[in-house]
Image: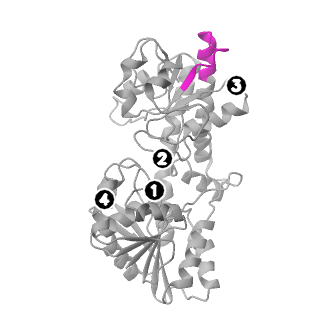
Amino acid sequence: MINVIGLGYIGLPTALMLASHGVEVVGTDYNQKLVDTLNAGKTTFKEKGLDELFNDAVKHGIKFATEYLVTDTYIISVPTPYDKFSKKVDACYVVTAVENVLDVCPKGATVIIESTVSPGTIDKYVRPAVEAKGFVIGMDIHLVHAPERIIPGNMVYELLHNNRTIGADEPEIGEKVKSLYASFCGGEIVVTDIRTAEMTKVVENTFRAVNIAFANELAKICRHDDMDVYEIIKICNMHPRVNILQPGPGVGGHCISVDPWFLVGDYPSLAKVIDESMKTNDGMPDFVLNRIYEIMKENGLEDVGRVGLYGLTYKENVDDMRESPTLQLLESQARHLALPLKVYDPFIGDDVVPNQYHNLDMFLSDVDLVVIMVKHSEIRENMEKLEGKIVLDCHNICNLPGVYHI
């Protein structure tokens, strides 16, 4: 039996995937409401294919609880935030989960940490916690790092098809865990040491962050001298060895907006390019806010306040708001005590911010300036409804005349 600890955006799909492929699974989370929802037969967030996977896992006998189970294999998938000042990883949730496992697990159990951590985190924080409990690593307990590699919006497909990395102290334990993931994963599974596994996951997300920052910096340069960044990128990408990404209003989610900071925190004198890239990406919501003020002034909207942000999530067609650029923009705007902005997102049913709408037509009827923060399919399929509006398109998806860009 596998006990999956943490039933959020990564832990729940992983538990469901294992169960649907015949592995006996119990999912554990401290959140009683979340566990009750799952036991009532409902998923806790929206994701393509997740409901079908959930139903299949339930048929195969998956269970959900708030207690840690006595078994021989644990998968820990809890959050790993970072300290806003030092930029170092905050491993407290991982350490607490490991300590709770050690309170119930039999000797010889394998603890697999899926949570993304900075290189050396398991050495600095997890091993001492294990040894403090009196366990001998490699005999009483086996530590493994198997970082997730999936993205909201396409989780089910990527769990099945993406390559995976397994980091282990002992090759035979690594191969055992590889077999477990191979029960559902059709991609290549590489077995290596723990620190290499830690580093590869962080480097993957850092690579993406740096490339996004380059596109965002180009947007700022082109805005400064009134050049079309999208046309420039399109022409540059005709070169066979150039593939510039598209700029946007910021970077959200728990991977690209967080993980690269781990390297900055651990290697502040070395990670200079990464540091500047993250600052560039983090500065995009303020850049968009300044564009909003410019457009309001140009169109005489300074005292009207009929400005609306379309999209609250961090990316299209998901309900995940973690590190959302829109939330960052609203926080910055509130500090400036400017006119309140109206907000709408088809994927967010609950009221999470002031002036939030739950119907596209009502939202549009109350705004003159629409800022496309997220490129949900809904807005792509209803561009005609933006006719007559002033539009700031942060993703270059609107082909109506007179559209503003970042």
- Residue at label 1? 9
Structural crowding at the residue carrying mark 1, measured as other residues with C-alpha within 10 Å and reported as few (<14), some (14–19) or many (≥20):
many
Q: Secondary structure at mark 3?
A: loop
Q: CA distance from mark 1 to mark 4?
A: 14 Å
Query: On residue 77, which mark appears?
Result: none
Q: CA distance from mark 2 to mark 1?
A: 9 Å
**What residue sits 31% from the left and 52% below the top?**
49
Q: CA distance from mark 2 to mark 4?
A: 19 Å
Q: Secondary structure at mark 2?
A: loop
Query: On residue 53, which mark appears?
Result: 4
What kind of residue is marked 4? Answer: Leu
Comparing 77 with 42, the one in front is: 42
**Residue 305 magenta:** yes
Q: Are marks 2 and 3 in contact (CB under 8 Å)?
A: no
What kind of residue is marked 3? Answer: Ala
Q: Are marks 2 and 1 in contact (CB under 8 Å)?
A: yes
The answer to which of marks 2 and 4 sits earlier in the sequence is: 4
Q: Is residue 283 visible?
A: no
Please state the extent of the stretch shown in magenta in the rendering.
291-308
What kind of residue is marked 2? Answer: Asp
> Is 138 drawn above or below residue 262 in the view shown?
below
What kind of residue is marked 1? Answer: Tyr
Q: CA distance from mark 4 to mark 3?
A: 45 Å
Q: Nearer the viewer, mark 1 or mark 4?
A: 4
Structural crowding at the residue carrying mark 2, measured as other residues with C-alpha within 10 Å and reported as few (<14), some (14–19) or many (≥20):
many
**What residue sits 48% from the left and 51% below the top?**
205
**What residue sits 63% from the left and 79% below the top?**
128
> Is 285 drawn above or below residue 114 in the view shown?
above
- Residue at label 3? 338
